Image (cartoon, rainbow, N blue to C red):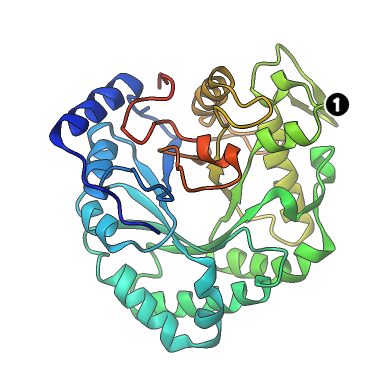
Amino acid sequence: MHTMTMQNSITMFAIVLALGALVTMPRGGQSIGVCYGRLGDNLPQPSTVISLYKSKNINGMRLYDPYDVALQALKGSNIELILDVPNDKLQSLASDASAASTWVQNNIKAYSSDVKFKYIAVGNEVIPGDSAQYVLPAMQNIQNALTSAGLQNQIKVSTAVSTVVLGTSYPPSSGSFSSAALSSLGSIINFLSSNGSPLLANVYPYFSYIDNTGSIDLKYALFTSPGTVVTDGSLQYQNLFDAIVDSLYSALEKAGGSNVGIVISESGWPSAGGNAATIDNAQTYNQNLINHVGKGTPKKPGAIEAFIFEMFNENQKSPEVEKHFGLFNSDGTPVYSINF
């Protein structure tokens, strides 16, 4: 990760004005957070960013590594945090319990009296794959370190998966994990179930749509279908987001995780750089996601915890479309307006 350049007071003022125009956070059962990625060489300082979260009552953040400057700035903010164990740390934390203990002491315990850690994401989108074997032992070592630190009741340990873990996703009731994913996920689901932890899932109707434009209508992906698109037994689906989430719930049930919840650890739509990546579509998707999360899905009604990807456009990501998921440009001006 790259250290951010300091912005002057004029830029800070512009950011505050921009954010003020863009968001007022909802009050209610649903929880909307925003992912704070830092793969840009032109982004505001973490203290500035976190002041914006606080000033607009954005009540959740995902931080992809234990960046001490951001953690310091989060002190006293009351922002609920998903903190990632970066993928390149998984092997060492899996093989060495003392390394996991040190990681928890330095990055969690040192801040836990002032920072609201809620979830630790042990790896992001590593299942299935070469590093998948390290996820569960790293989770277990982190869990044991949290218990030793007396934090096991306030922080839940999980991992973040993409929908590539699904071998079958249609119809939602037939959702099941692929055999490649299940070889790692099976015992992870048992861990989540026994610890009362949710599965973290990165859910992108955008990518499902662009990979299947012949069979998926854009309105279904953007929450703008006027009526039911998919009927699955007694359940009716009007948007692709619900169908994907319920496919994951069906897969969890088949894998013995019927009591495991799902937190949407990323979801968003790009405003440029790819097929159907327009400002109008990005605004429509994220606005409708915000409006929708309080309702839940046909299979699981009730509030959903979700994190929008993401706060800023990040100019050091690739491919090009990955640079354009932000609600904000790097100078803090809104890419488009959102009404909460």
Note whether 48 is above or below 161 in the view shown. Answer: above
Residue 69 % position (x, y):
25, 59
Q: Quadrant of residue 43?
A: top left
Residue 12 % position (x, y):
20, 33
Residue found at the far top of this picture? 226
Classify the position of the N terminus by image quarter.
bottom left
Residue found at the far left of this picture? 9
Q: Quadrant of residue 271?
A: top right
Residue 216 % position (x, y):
80, 26
Secondary structure under tag 1 reads loop
Q: How many marks?
A: 1
Identify the residue under disc 1.
214
Determine the residue positioned at 27% across, 64% down: 112
- Taking the image as shown, residue 331 lies to the left or right of residue 94, namely left
CA neighbours of label 1 inside 10 A, class few (<14), some (14 to 19), many (20+): few
- Taking the image as shown, residue 61 lies to the left or right of residue 225, namely left
Determine the residue positioned at 31% across, 77% down: 105
Note whether 275 is above or below 37 in the view shown. Answer: above
Residue 298 visible at all: no
- Taking the image as shown, residue 193 lies to the left or right of residue 70, namely right
Determine the residue positioned at 55% across, 25% down: 282
Q: Quadrant of residue 147?
A: bottom left
Residue 84 visible at all: yes
Front-lying residue, 191 or 34? 34
Residue 304 % position (x, y):
53, 38
In the image, what residue type sits under mark 1? Gly
Classify the position of the C terminus by image quarter.
top left
